[in-house]
Image: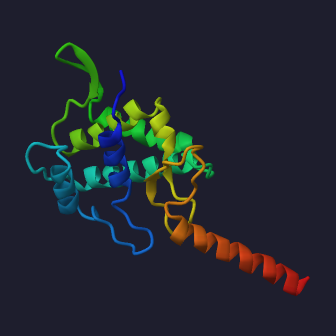
């Protein structure tokens, strides 16, 4: 049985990419924006009203996932701290094994904002043991950090875009090499 993980991978990628490092635009910068995003993604049945604490937790979960995706790309990241953040969010959502039509699923007890956060954490937990998870990465460019899916055959892609971030890195390396030669 082949499982299609694309919807789950897309959810995690899109969640991480709610913050654009280059422009500073954060699509979930307020509790209202977070509520709208959760609703648009189908993570809640009715529009929720996240508290300031729930909003802060949602942002912390996003950055914890980003850290794990950067680690998937060989970038030094505190995976233990990220894991703890995700574990805490899962606990707050009442994440546990539930049975739907006799099939076990990881799902939150909470239906509100905490439940939506829990659904994202559950998605990460379901993806983490798969080969597909290893292909979900954070761009190595420090100014970018976009989450992307590595479609390369040998899973060697390190930038979200060779044309933008890859070229930027090549230019930095070129300037660094020539600055060393000029001073040496």
User: Where is residue 136 shown, x and y percent of the image?
Assistant: 46, 46
Location of the C terminus by quadrant is bottom right
Judged from this view, the residue extending furthest toward the bottom is 182
- Res 6 → quadrant: top left
Q: Is residue 184 left or right of residue 65?
A: right
Location of the N terminus by quadrant is top left
The residue depicted at 46 percent of the width and 38 percent of the height is 133
Q: Is residue 69 left or right of residue 76?
A: left
- Res 80 → quadrant: top right
Judged from this view, the residue extending furthest toward the left is 46
The residue depicted at 27 percent of the width and 35 percent of the height is 93
User: Where is residue 51 shown, x and y percent of the image?
Assistant: 21, 53
Most foreground residue, 134 or 121: 134
The residue depicted at 52 percent of the width and 58 percent of the height is 139
Say if residue 49 shows up in the picture: yes
Most foreground residue, 80 or 181: 181
Judged from this view, the residue extending furthest toward the top is 102
User: Where is residue 21 shown, x and y percent of the image?
Assistant: 44, 68
């Amino acid at each position: 049985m082949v499982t299609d993980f694309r919807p789950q991978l897309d959810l995690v990628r899109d969640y991480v990419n709610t913050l654009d490092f280059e422009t500073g635009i954060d699509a979930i910068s307020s509790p209202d924006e977070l509520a709208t995003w959760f609703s648009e993604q189908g993570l809640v049945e009715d529009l929720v009203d996240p508290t300031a604490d729930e909003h802060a937790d949602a942002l912390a979960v996003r950055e914890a996932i980003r850290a794990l995706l950067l680690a998937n790309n060989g970038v030094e990241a505190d995976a233990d701290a990220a894991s703890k953040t995700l574990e805490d969010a899962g606990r707050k959502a009442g994440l546990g094994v539930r049975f739907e039509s006799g099939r076990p699923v990881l799902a939150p007890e909470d239906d509100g904002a905490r439940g939506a956060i829990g659904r994202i954490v559950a998605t990460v937990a379901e993806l983490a043991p798969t080969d597909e998870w290893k292909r979900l990465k954070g761009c190595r460019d420090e100014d970018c950090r976009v989450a992307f899916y590595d479609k390369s055959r040998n899973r060697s892609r390190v930038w979200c875009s060779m044309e933008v971030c890859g070229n930027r890195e090549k230019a930095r390396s070129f300037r660094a090499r020539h600055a060393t030669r000029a001073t040496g």
